[in-house]
Image (cartoon, grey):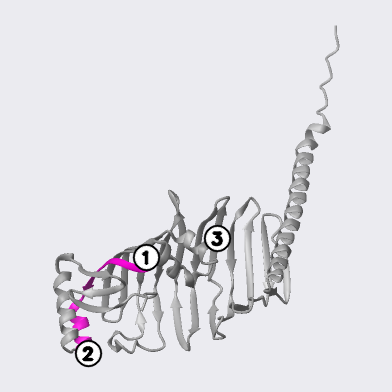
Amino acid sequence: MASPTPPKKRSRLGLFLPFVLLFLAIGAWSAWWHVARGRIDQAVDTWIAEQEARGAAFTYAGRHMGGYPFRFELVFDAPAYEGRPGEASWEGSRAEFVMQAWNLTHMIGRMPGHHVITGADGIRNSVDFDGHAAFSLSWNKAGLNRFGFQSGEAQALLGGQIYNLSNLSLNLAPRPESPDDLMVAIQWDKLALDAAPVAAPYLGTELGPSRLIGEVRGFFPAYEASSREINRVWPVMLETGGEVEVAQLLLDWGPLDLGAQANLTLANGRSNGAFKVRIENADELKQAMIDSGYWGQQEQIVFGTLEAASRDDGFLTLPVKDDTVFVGPVPLGKLPGSRP
């Protein structure tokens, strides 16, 4: 009678193989993370050197890179950017930049604390962000994919005036089917001003929930032509051509509940097109104007025309002819950047 075959012992390699593979994967990931970290550090150093070569400077009190194993977190303590002569400069408390290790084309940034911006004219402005303020930037081979910003609770000192801002949201992106065009969406929950506007004190100092959605066609070519100086984009577009569309503007400012749309064509140094405006709660606005003493003949004509046009969800059309905005035959004023 044959003796039974003894059972085979389970290979120890089979027991340890999953752990070996896991350790190899961890080692490979760790090696890649540290290589990528070195490349990010090198890219930052290269950018700083490029700024110095063009006469600018970026400095900081401390610089740290962390986030292992799943993120890259670059932190600057007391960062400062000194532009070339004739350019603006910036000083901040802290700047934090974060990228997920598996997506190096999307960055989230935070800049909590106090920041000072000095313009090319030497005027100093400042802004303070809380820990909730953040921006998001994504890109691809073609350039910008999307930029978003959330302010949290912020306070700004601009031009000697103090502004308190709650939950500003700003989103910018090129239109996918037309990458020369910039889509814009802005909204906030509350904006408190230091003082009411001199020309319309009845509006008060507090703006409630408001929103703007629009598009600037031909923005990016104009941005490049203006040497990437945002304040020069409008004059460049006036000369090279472009269009501005406001699909929706909702403004809550004291007694004023304003809705507006706009379409402007920029060409040959002039802007032409039209604004469409309407108001809600007209009686509240009228009483505020009367109480503040701003109820003269011209104000009554403009208000009466606007109130009548706003009935039944209607709009009052304000033509724009060669930079001048009209109510009927009466000129209201000129758009910025117009020729004398």
Q: Position of residue 79 (x, y in %)?
A: 67, 75
Tell me if residue 151 can be seen.
Answer: no
Q: Residue at x 58, y 69 (%)?
A: 110
- The residue nearer to you, when weighing 211 against 131, is 211
Q: Name the residue under label 3.
A: 137
N-term-proximal mark, 2 vs 3: 3
Quadrant of res 109? bottom right
Residue 230 point in image, percent of width and height: 50, 69
> Is 318 inside the magenta-drawn segment?
no
Depth check: give the residue in front, 134 or 265: 265
Which amino acid type is marked by label 1?
A: Asn
Residue type marked 3: Leu
Front-lying residue, 15 or 175: 175
Give above or below for 61 relative to 46.
below
Q: Is 72 left, or right, of 273 in this rendering?
A: right
Circle 2 — which element? loop
Contact flag, marks 2 and 3 (Cβ < 8 Å): no
Count of all numbered marks drawn on residues in the image? 3
Left or right placement of residue 76 versus residue 120 in this view = right
Magenta stretch, residue numbers: 267-292
Identify the mark nearer the N-term, 1 or 3.
Answer: 3
Q: Where is residue 223 in the image (x, y as percent from the top left)?
A: 50, 64
Residue bearing the label numbered 1 = 268
Q: How crowded is mark 3: few (under 14 residues within 10 Å), some or many (20 or more)?
A: some
Q: Looking at the picture, does residue 105 appear above or below residue 152? A: above
Residue type marked 2? Tyr
**Would you call the spot at circle 1 few (<14 residues within 10 Å), some (14-19), or many (20 or more)?**
few
Which type of secondary structure does the marked residue at label 3 adopt?
Answer: strand
Instruction: Quickly name the residue at label 2.
Output: 294
